[in-house]
């Protein structure tokens, strides 16, 4: 069974040295030829650079990762590439419509491959982007569905990812009211993965 590389995305956390350790790890992986883990660590390096305000450095890391995705050309690599691009559009460019498109692409592909972990990752991203794009009710439903799936697959967002979820929950609470938000999230938790994926990828009216 192929290693689930998105596990690496979830568990490489805030305690990692922001600069030299990440650069060193990417360099080691370049030498060993472990392309999939190189993509994972380049994604983390891009995220760090964005946090530091080094958008050019972040773009270089994203570009290198996406080039490896093209070379690798496996379904898993393609999904990871779509999520890398989605995160950069979200965090660096604030292009929430573009990020939504890429999160949806990754979610559709991972769901068709039968991967619950990658689909859950995509559900969370789509929910956040829908909230940014003003689709508050659908975002709340998907946050509930994503939370239930996170518990099922053992996904525990840390650091900036947990903070991003907290912020979008606050946005939805302000838009919908806490009672309605809770009702929708509870309804979302009861959805099947197929239902949640269909709702997430349904075109905006």
Image: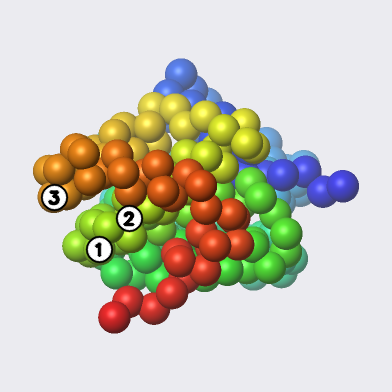
For mark 2, give the secondary structure.
Answer: helix
Q: Mark 2 and mark 1 in contact (Cβ < 8 Å)?
A: yes
Q: Residue at x 41, y 48 (%)?
A: 187
Say whether residue 13 is visible.
yes
Q: Residue at x 43, y 50 (%)?
A: 188
Residue 154 location in percent, x, y? 62, 31
**Residue 203 vs residue 107, the one in the foreground:** 203
Which circle's residue, 3 or 2, is located before the other in the chain? 2
Residue 5 location in percent, x, y? 67, 44
Q: Is residue 203 above or below residue 128?
A: below
Residue 203 location in percent, x, y? 39, 78
Q: Is residue 27 above or below residue 140?
A: above
Q: Residue at x 43, y 74 (%)?
A: 202
For mark 1, give the secondary structure.
Answer: loop
Query: Which residue matches tag 2?
Result: 139
How far apart are the alpha carbons under marks 1 and 3?
Answer: 10 Å
Query: Which residue matches tag 3?
Result: 175
Colour basis: rainbow
Identify the mark at residue 147; answer none if there is no mark.
none
Left or right, 172 with respect to 152, comes to left
Left or right, 167 with respect to 138, comes to left
């Amino acid at each position: 069974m192929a290693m689930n590389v998105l596990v690496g995305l979830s568990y490489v956390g805030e305690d990692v040295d922001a600069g030299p350790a990440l650069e060193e790890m990417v360099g080691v992986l370049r030498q060993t030829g472990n392309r999939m883990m190189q993509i994972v660590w380049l994604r983390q390096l891009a995220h760090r650079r964005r946090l530091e305000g080094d958008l050019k450095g972040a773009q270089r890391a994203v570009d290198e990762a996406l080039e490896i995705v093209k070379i690798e050309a496996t379904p898993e690599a393609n999904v990871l590439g779509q999520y890398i691009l989605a995160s950069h559009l979200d965090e660096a460019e604030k292009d929430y419509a573009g990020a939504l498109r890429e999160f949806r692409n990754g979610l559709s592909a991972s769901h068709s491959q039968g991967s619950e972990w990658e689909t859950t990752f995509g559900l969370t991203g789509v929910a956040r982007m829908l909230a940014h794009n003003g689709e508050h009710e659908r975002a709340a439903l998907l946050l509930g569905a994503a939370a239930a799936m996170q518990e099922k697959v053992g996904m525990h967002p840390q650091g900036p990812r947990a903070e991003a979820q907290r912020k979008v929950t606050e946005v939805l609470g302000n838009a919908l009211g806490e009672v309605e938000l809770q009702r929708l999230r509870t309804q979302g938790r009861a959805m099947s993965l197929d239902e949640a994926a269909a709702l997430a990828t349904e075109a905006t009216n």
